[in-house]
Image (cartoon, grey):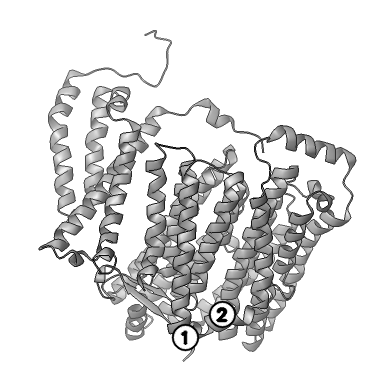
Amino acid sequence: MSSLDFSPRAYVESTIIMTTVRVVSPFVFTFGLFVMFHGAESAGGGFQGGAIVASSIIMLAFAFGIEPTREWLDDDFVRVVIGGGASTFALIGLGALAFGGPFLNYSAYGISHGVKYGIELVELGIGAIVAGVIVSLFMNLAAGFSDEETDGDEA
Amino acid sequence: MTDALVLLIVLPIVAAILPVFLGILSDRAGWYVALAMSLAHLGLSTVVANAVVTSGRLSYAVGGFQPPFGIELVADGISAPLLVLISLSTLGVVVYARRAGPHSNAFYSELALLTAGISGVVATADVFNLYVFLEITGLATYALVASGRSPRAAVASLKYLFVGTIGASLYLLGTGYLYIATGTLNMASLSEALAGVGYTPAVLTGFGLMATGLLVKVAVFPLHTWQPGAYAESPDTVSAYISALVSTAAAYGLFRVTYTVFTRDFLETVPIAADAFVLLGSVSIVAGSVLAVMQSDLKRMLAYSSVSQFGLVVTAIGIGNETALIGAVVHLIGHAVMKGGLFLALGVFAASVGARTMDEFKGLAAREPVTSAAFAVLAFSMVGIPPAIGFIGKWNIVVGAVEAGSWSVALVVVVSTLLTLAYFGRVIERMYFTHPDEADVADASVSADGGQPASDVSLGMRTVVVVAAVTAVLLGIAGSDLISIIQPALEVYFV
């Protein structure tokens, strides 16, 4: 790398950061899931949990470089996570209609503790959306802007 | 079949997800999803409207949690026509977008999300839920405005983002005040609770914040600054859709908050609230019209015209008698049809002959006869010439103002009609009675051929514009039927 190359990726590997992140991130990820599952009966929920899960991935990107993270976690996968989360929510809601209850009526499923499981699944879905959106926003911002977008065509 | 009411919101959300998945398979999948969504949406809204017409008000407790604790959705004589309007506008815009674009899957996702947001604003009976749907509407609109290719679209979107977020936050803050004062968020139970609590300073603050927030979204004169940029810089398809529905949804929200939540007692006890609406509305009518007359870019002219027309609706909300409110609702519906159609017509002109400014419109009628005729019909309808829908709305508002004894308001409305005639007359005069300079024609055809080769005009695009013009006239002829649907829902507030 020449010193004149002022590309935005001035990334330097740091053993301390990499080791710390390697140890911490699984715990952060698990804690995110924990917060999501708590949406049903105590403080917590998909938004907070999703943000925590996303932060564990962003941490990885900081420690191991953004490009390697992008290769490991490609766009289509993130897209499927976001869509899957939203679909989970919609399907649970619509499923209640199929069982003859109103939209999003968890007790229509007739499972014991159905309300709790229903809310937890919905929270997981929301968590997936939030985590996916935050990660893709981060990746998009990190990718920077190409010149062709700033040119614009004269209307 | 009350499930149709909730499906009106769920269906577009699902339709917003599908292009994300299908985008992996095909680049054009979004359009087919959007078309299927708008057809199904139309079916559902027809079912809802039919149920409302035959058996009156329709209520739906989401998740089986009964109101006031659960979220309630409501369709009545006011929201049902608006829901049908949303479906029809979506269908029209999707058909138009097939050739005109934007073609990306992301665009159709955003469009579907916007449909969900607007349907939610219209269907909900919960003030916090209204905030959520306002934000969905806002976020989808910011993204749609930014889908314009020029850098100015990005600036307009950013401006809208800032101003719109402030507006939504003010509304949310007001909702918080009401919740603290009463402990409920359901509109119907709020109105009962408010009568018990009385109009304490907290409640008054809540009203002020909610109304201001919604007025920002409606784009009434001093708060309109986001609107001309957002309408003018976005792609024509987007301009048409957001001009038809986004401010309409906010104005509907304002109406609901004022009459369902705070009721007429509030307006009578706190006359300054009604006076503020009338004053802001009147200023907006005049200022919007004057600014519209000054524009040379046609899209900007139509944008300022919307400022003026929504001033009319806000004034009617302030006048607050039955006639004026009927006028307000009819004008909301009529304005959506007319303004959406006008923007789509501008899109046709821009794509076929490259005409975007006042000077380029010279002699346009000879080159684009059908679209020009539709444009003229829509413009005269907007001015308020019978039998088109614009007349019914304005007429009821004027009669309402006279009934309430506000002659000054009636005068403002009549003057605004003249000003509307001034800015549309200018365009129509150029289209029909001015011969184009030879150089202009050559220039325009060159730029149309060389500048944008892909975006020629399809039959579908022209058809949508013509259908909008025909709808504006037919709605006017069927005006009394429309009023007979709206009236029962309004009479509730006047017992």
Quarter of the image holding residue B473? bottom right
Query: Cβ–Cβ below 8 Å for labels 1 and 2?
Result: yes
Q: Position of residue B422 (x, y in %)?
A: 78, 63
Q: How many residues crowd mark 1 within 10 Å: few (<14), some (14–19), many (20+)? A: some
- Asked which secondary structure carries label 2, the reply is helix
**Residue occupying the far bottom of the picture:** B495
* CA distance for labels 1 and 2: 11 Å
Compared to residue A78, the image places residue A5 above or below, namely above
Mark sitting on residue B115: none
Q: Of the residues shown, which amino acid type is indicated by label 1?
A: Tyr
Compared to residue B110, the image places residue B204 above or below, namely below
Q: Position of residue B272 (x, y in %)?
A: 52, 78
| Closer to us: B26 or A152 | B26
Please tell me which of labels 1 and 2 falls first in the chain. Answer: 2
Q: Position of residue B468 (x, y in %)?
A: 65, 62
- Asked which secondary structure carries label 1, the reply is helix
Q: Is residue B56 left or right of residue B472?
A: left
Mark sitting on residue B493: 1
Q: Residue at x 47, y 54 (%)?
A: B36
Which residue bears the numbered disc 2?
A: B325
Quarter of the image holding residue B227? bottom right
| Closer to us: B315 or A143 | A143
**Callout 2: residue from which chain?**
B
Q: Residue at x 75, y 47 (%)?
A: B357
